[in-house]
Amino acid sequence: MRKSPAIFLATLIFFVSFCNTIKAQNKLDSLLPVRGFCINAPRPPQLDSFVNFIDKELSSRKVNTLILQIDYSYQFKTHPELADSFALSTAEVKRIVKVCQKNNIRIIPHVNFLGHQSWAKRLNKLLQQYPQFDETPWIAMPEKYVWPNADNLYCKSYCPLHPDLHKVIFDVMDELCDVLEANAFHAGMDEVFYIGEDKCPRCGGRDKAELFAGEVRAIHDHLAQKGRELWIWGDRLIDGKTTGLGEWEASYNNTYRAIDMIPKDVVICDWHYERADKTAVYFAMKGLRVITCPWRDPQIAITQINDMVSFRQTATPEMKDRFFGIMETTWSRTEFFLRGFYQPAKTPNERTAWNCFRVMYGEIGRLE
């Protein structure tokens, strides 16, 4: 039976549109292989809104990687004592997995390892439940947190050499990767101020760079046993004094030398929020894949996008694929981000994570 001209024309239009979509997608994948979004896991009351945001907003902007900062907001079966009071159930997490799979978005769980074991005056769940893992147990959490302070307390760290530590954190890591069906894990490891402290009976007197690299290798090697990648933030691998980047975006305690001691397949998330620093080139020259990470300044994000595209287009064949892409970071609870996102910006250059996200992915859309 012959098709009518109208059906034939509709089929042809669909085919041409489909081919153009695939062509645009291939071009975008070539320019920015990773187009990421990093956000805290939602609390149960916000789950519906978050799933809808992934389905409508991330997918339409061709986001292909979601870093889910879940930390201890999951009802762990291996270590139920580590679950926060607002933790998601397995069924709730699977709803996030399903919507990501539907939209071809790679999901990567994030838990802060090594540093960020406290915030302000509160310990996180790991040190609450396992105080013996504390790198600096002699430093008490303050009733009122201020910075700077006499203890140089920003966030607590765990002791990477405690003999019982890795059994616990590897259980956490494996369970999250399993439930999220993830082939990579983001271990954080940023802003580590406490490491190799002299009073630590295990770490005292040891080289801080070797301690940092040893922890990266331990986590990496465990993940590799199941074919999973390790992602980390890159700030501890940059010399803060030589570069002038300071002790937040880079290291003042000599961990930067660890860059030559870690596996070359670790993925580096390189964050700079006040300037579009070109440190992606440094990481790529060290043989590491690197993703540039904006936060809240739309104009800086646009520069960072253009830089990453330019790096890939002008690099040697050996370097090109190390320039891995770009990822928006949010640093707020999910409900705060969503509330801001669905309100109009006060100005085109409003310095918020949600406006930066809108502007950044608008710019990426123009690359197609």
Image (tube, rainbow, N blue to C red):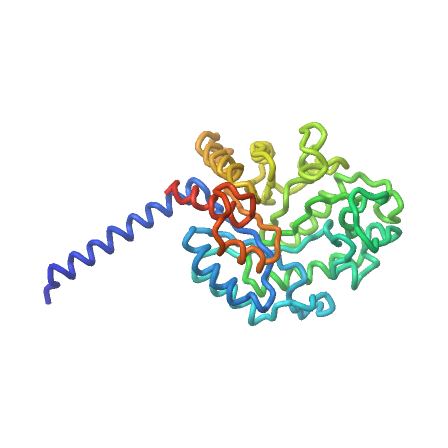
Q: Please give the name of the residue rendered at 83% of the width and 53% of the height, measured from the top-left corner.
A: 142
- Residue 237 point in image, percent of width and height: 67, 38
Q: Please give the name of the residue rendered at 27% of the width and 52% of the height, measured from the top-left corner.
A: 17
Q: Please give the name of the residue rendered at 64% of the width and 61% of the height, measured from the top-left corner.
A: 174
- Residue 166 point in image, percent of width and height: 74, 57
User: Residue 233 appears in which quarter of the rendering?
Assistant: top right
- For the view shown, which residue lies furthest in the top direction? 242
Image height check: is 9 above or below 293? below
Name the residue nearer the viewer: 239 or 169: 239
- Residue 119 point in image, percent of width and height: 74, 53
The C terminus sits in image quarter:
top left
Q: Is residue 306 left or right of residue 174?
A: left
Q: Is residue 270 left or right of residue 135?
A: left
User: Residue 210 appears in which quarter of the rendering?
Assistant: top right
* Residue 224 seen in render: no
Q: How many marks?
A: 0
Name the residue nearer the viewer: 43 or 35: 43
- Residue 282 point in image, percent of width and height: 60, 32
The N terminus sits in image quarter:
bottom left
Q: Please give the name of the residue rendered at 70% of the width and 36% of the height, measured from the top-left corner.
A: 256
User: Residue 3 appears in which quarter of the rendering?
Assistant: bottom left
* Residue 84 seen in render: yes
